[in-house]
Amino acid sequence: MHLWMSGEVQADVGDAHRLARKAVEHAVNERLKNCSLSVDFDEWAFISIIRQQDHPDYPEFKKKHAKRKVLEFRLKIPHQDFLNASEIGRVELLVSALKRSVNLLAEFRVSSEDQTKLLAALDDTYRQLAASRNW
């Protein structure tokens, strides 16, 4: 499985989101290369929603695209928290949102074993990025 990340974010957090997102996406994908999963999906698509005001055009949702083998999640991250966070705090907010998406995988009948492996990859990613700060 491969993680693809993007965002529906306001301009005032756009650059900060891009830096944190790229670091997280790269680090998670490095871990997924060596992770054997039983899930029959090729892509884990995650879109952050970071907006000052809630808007009906930007709802949270999860979707399974069986033909394309994609699991898609659009989840909200509190704008003010992201704006005020340090670099590693932003990474932590992204990783927390990704963990929330992993917990939602049960609804798509993804095994608890696969969920545990993905959560471990996210924990490892956070530890690595917090320790290195070279991203």
Image (tube, rainbow, N blue to C red):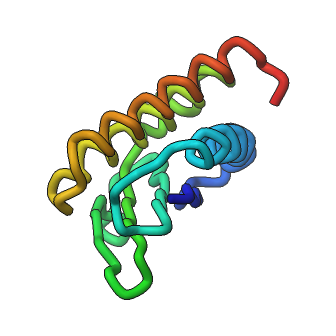
Residue pictured at 47% horizontal, 57% vertical: 46
Provide residue 119's location: percent of width, then percent of height.
39, 33
Asked if residue 94 can be seen in this view, the reply is yes
Asked if residue 17 shows in the view, the reply is: no
Q: Residue furthest bottom?
A: 67
Say which residue appears at 48% left-offset and 24% top-offset.
123
Task: Work out whether 80 lies above or below 54.
Answer: above
Residue 114 percent coordinates (x, y) = 32, 45
Q: Name the quadrant containing residue 87.
A: top right
- Between 3 and 1, the one nearer to me in the picture: 1
Task: Give the residue drawn at x 53%, y 32%.
Answer: 82
Q: Is residue 50 above or below residue 129?
A: below
Q: With 76 as the anchor, is 128 left or right in this view? A: right
Task: Give the quarter of the figure containing the C terminus.
Answer: top right
In this picture, is 2 found above or below 26? below
At horizontal 49% and vertical 32% (from top left) the residue drawn is 122
Give left or right: position of 9 versus 98: right
Q: Taking 91 as reference, is 44 left or right?
A: left
> As rendered, which of 86 and 24 lies closer to the eye?
24
Q: Is residue 43 left or right of residue 62?
A: right
Q: Position of residue 73 (x, y in %)?
A: 37, 60
Residue at the far top in the pictured view: 131
Which is more toward the observer, 52 or 41? 41
